[in-house]
Each structure stands twice: as C-alpha cells, then as structure tokens.
C-alpha cells in the first residue's frame, strides 16, 4: 500500500472514530462505565477534547496526523528517570493485546498519553507511583485503525 492510500485509510478510520466517540458516545461509554462512575465523567470530557482535536486534524495536511497521540498511534517514549525506552500502540479497548504492545486508550497510561505531542514530557500516574515519560515518536498506523471500533458495536 502506498503512503497516500495509507493516509487516506487513516483519515477514513478517524472519521469512524468520530462517529463512535462523538455521535455514539453514550452507547460507547455505557459499554464500559456505569452512569454514576466518576471516571465516566472525566472520560466524557476527554472524548470531547479528543474528537474536537481529530476534527481539526482532518482539515489539515497528512503530516499533522503524526503530530499528536491518537487512537491508532504507535508511540516511542523514554522513561526519563530510568533512562530506558519503550513503545506501544494506543488502540480501542477491544483491540488491546499487551503481549503485542497494544494498550487501550481507556487504560490509565493510554488515557494520560492521549493527545500528547512529540517531545512533550508527561508525568504518568501508575499504581506504583508517578513517572516522567518523554514522547519521542508518533506514527498513526492504518493497520491499527482497521481493527474493530469496539464498545458501541457490541452495545448496539
């Protein structure tokens, strides 16, 4: 697949995300959170910011698709305090596979890295404490976006 087709595919899949996480947000959230769960309220706000950012990205050039951590992004990052590096892909919940380096955007780490920028340092809260990570690289992968969009599909 050539780069142009790959980027076009990424754009189509981002539009599908907008439908799932925007127009079908309530159904998606119902599949993963109780209506009274405080995390649901936080995630609703984050999804509004995410969908607004994706809408803006879709109006821009293809290069912008790799400028921010999105669902479907493969990210390379550095644990600043430990002088080590790692990488994984942020995916929809139903596509999670830690053994393959695929973590859900709903996971604590995924949620904290979503909408991060290359070069940005973020303090990530984990059960074992806080750690600083630097986002070293971002690449939106069309194959990650080909997976199911989860949540809303199963709840309908």
Image (cartoon, grey):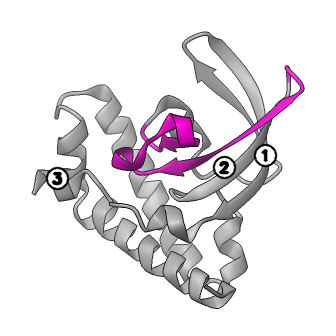
Q: Residue placed at 60% from the left, 22% from the top?
A: 125
What is the secondary structure assignment of the residue under circle 3? helix
- What is the count of numbered marks? 3
Q: Position of residue 122 (x, y in %)?
A: 72, 35
Is residue 128 in view from this perspective? yes
Q: Residue placed at 58% from the left, 88% from the top?
A: 5
Q: Where is residue 148 in the image (x, y as percent from the top left)?
A: 33, 60
For marks 3 and 2 on the same chain, the one whose residue lies earlier in the sequence: 2
Q: Name the residue under label 2.
A: 116
Q: Do the residues labelled 2 and 1 touch (CB within 8 Å)?
A: yes
Q: Does residue 91 show up magenta in the picture?
A: yes
Image quarter hosting the C terminus: bottom left
Q: Residue placed at 50% from the left, 56% from the top?
A: 71
Is residue 138 toward the left or the right of residue 11 in the image?
right
Image quarter hosting the N terminus: bottom right
Which label was assigned to residue 120?
A: 1
The CA distance from mark 1 to mark 3 is 35 Å
* Residue 3 occupies quadrant: bottom right
Which label was assigned to residue 154?
A: 3
Is residue 152 toward the left or the right of residue 9 in the image?
left
């Amino acid at each position: 697949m050539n780069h142009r087709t790959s980027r076009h595919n990424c754009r189509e899949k981002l539009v599908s995300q907008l439908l799932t996480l925007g127009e079908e947000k309530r159904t998606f959230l119902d599949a993963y959170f109780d209506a009274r769960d405080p995390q649901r309220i936080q995630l609703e706000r984050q999804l509004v910011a995410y969908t607004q950012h994706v809408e803006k990205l879709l109006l821009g050039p293809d290069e912008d698709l790799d400028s921010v951590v999105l669902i479907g992004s493969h990210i390379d990052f550095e644990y600043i305090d430990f002088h080590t590096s790692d990488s994984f892909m942020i995916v929809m919940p139903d596509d999670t596979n830690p053994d393959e380096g695929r973590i859900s955007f709903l996971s604590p780490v995924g949620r904290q890295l979503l909408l991060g920028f290359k070069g940005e340092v973020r303090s990530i809260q984990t059960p074992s404490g806080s750690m600083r990570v630097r986002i070293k690289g971002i690449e939106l992968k069309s194959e990650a976006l080909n997976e199911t969009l989860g949540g809303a599909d199963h709840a309908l």
